[in-house]
Image (spheres, rainbow, N blue to C red):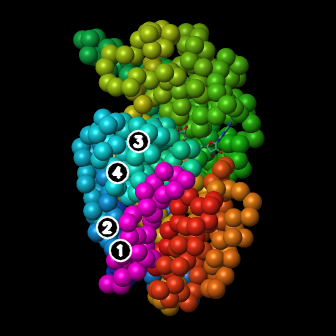
Amino acid sequence: MAVSALTENLKNGGVGRDIPQNPLTREVSRSITHQRSSFSYSTSPEAARHRPSFHESGSPFLIRTMTGAAPKKLQPFREQDIKILLLENVNKTGQDVLREQGYQVEALKSSLPEDQLIEKIKDVHVLGIRSKTKLNSRVLAAAKNLIVVGCFCIGTNQVDLKYAADHGICVFNSPFSNSRSVAELIIAEIICLARQLGDRSNEMHQGIWNKVSAKCWEVRGKTLGIVGYGHIGSQLSVLTESMGMRVIYYDVVNLMSMGTAHQVSSLDELLKGADFVTCHVPELPETKNMISTKEFEQMKQGSYLINASRGSVVDIPALIEAMKSGKIAGAALDVYPSEPAGNGDYFTNDLNSWAEDLRRLKNIILTPHIGGSTEEAQSAIGVEVAESLVRYVNEGVTIGAVNMPEVTLRSLTMDEPDHARVIFIHQNVPGVLGRVNKVLSDHNVDKQMSDSRGDMAYMMADISNVKQAEIDTLYRDLEGLKERIITRILY
Ligand SMILES: NC(=O)c1ccc[n+]([C@@H]2O[C@H](COP(=O)([O-])OP(=O)(O)OC[C@H]3O[C@@H](n4cnc5c(N)ncnc54)[C@H](O)[C@@H]3O)[C@@H](O)[C@H]2O)c1
């Protein structure tokens, strides 16, 4: 085990962090052992297009090397030095990925009150949370050693992302691990709506035998119109084609179809041609009420609407009118403009003024935002976020970060023993890179990438022929630049 200053992740000065007494005495492990997750989980084939994950031999970002030599595992600290606090019962799959790295992992089942949290995170390097833990500026300011936060969930509203970025704390989440779960829910809903299963089941629960076939349909041969052909939309496309449905889709981006699905050129064309319309777009100003009175008028008589995207996408009072008039034969909603924070009898007019009108409609499936709520999705989220954390801690790679520019470099290899990776998170002002490169100029900069996002920027460079003794000077010189937010050197 080598002793050097290579691995310090010190934050101080302008960002209110303490400088450790003797940052240069930490030991670093330069173990080359590859410890990888052995978990397998189902995820969208499309997701792989956007968000790679580790596989047997390492991250796809990291295994491509010029020489073909094995990638070198960089380690910023002696393994046991990385302190990780996981709150809110993070899935075991994620905990295991982190423990496999040799990090010190403490996992708590619940969130913590703010003052306890502040006390608890004083010396952690990595924090894992779900949706209940609020990381405001007061809490983040107390975490002097924090370099990265993993949100083991979809949303990141609970974190002050700007404050985190300005203080060099990278934030990751897992937006696409539940795509398959949502797609499968939509499959169920298409068939349930076509057969009026919700109503028949409710009637039976009330003791009513009502055997009908009028306006009950097979889905085979019907047309599904998918609005938004991203992770969920494209999964759904494959699944529904295998049930004999014809698939058309509308997306603002020109996208290659799965199977024999066909992209149409406008929302109007989709609405006119589909028996079932299902929305899978993000929440944006241009998707607000994108299905409203005019769109319902364009839809086929007796067609169906499904929305499991965001509550703002469908104008629900307009849907109520379209269903009352018989234009729309059924609907399934999983998301609403206002949703309660916890479980209970909250789905009333107090929450959304039309809730009780909606509840009275026939052939409408109402679910409490459960599209992505499966055991598989939780497990996949655990692995995906944990792997992002490992990549960030060990390699400095920010791909998938929600508050920092996405920066990666080809992996260092075992053929490059005297290389070091320099990461310099800094204020995005003119002249910084010139000063950084002056510091690096005694070495050969093999590769370098820099990108900015708002007020901050992220620079990563691999430099060669670095003697261990020189790392100390490099580190100190970079720390001395006034624009610096965080310096990390991995070896
Ligand atoms: N119900 C749930 O539990 C649940 C779970 C996961 C995701 N979601 C939501 O589902 C939606 C889709 O998720 P995803 O992972 O497939 O997203 P995605 O980003 O992979 O795909 C969204 C697609 O919509 C397209 N798009 C954007 N604006 C558009 C517009 N104005 N018109 C047409 N297409 C447009 C994009 O080009 C993209 O292809 C999101 O709103 C997400 O928040 C809900």
Mark found first going from the N terminus, 2 or 1:
1
> Could you tell me if residue 406 is visible in this image?
no
**Alpha-carbon span between mark 1 and mark 3:** 27 Å
Residue 183 left/right relative to 22: right
Give the structural element (helix, strand or loop) at label 4: loop
Tell me whether circle 4 and circle 1 mark residues in contact (CB < 8 Å): no
Q: In the image, ligand 1 is in what quadrant? A: top right
What x and y, as percent, mark residue 239? 48, 47
What x and y, as percent, mark residue 325? 59, 9
* In front of the other: 352 or 213: 352
Residue beneath disc 1: 26
Query: What are the residue bounds of the magenta stretch?
Result: 1-28
Question: Looking at the image, which residue sits at the far front?
Answer: 21
Mark closer to the observer (2, 4): 4
**Alpha-carbon span between mark 4 and mark 3:** 9 Å
Residue beneath disc 4: 122
**Alpha-carbon span between mark 3 and mark 2:** 22 Å
What x and y, as percent, mark residue 190? 47, 33
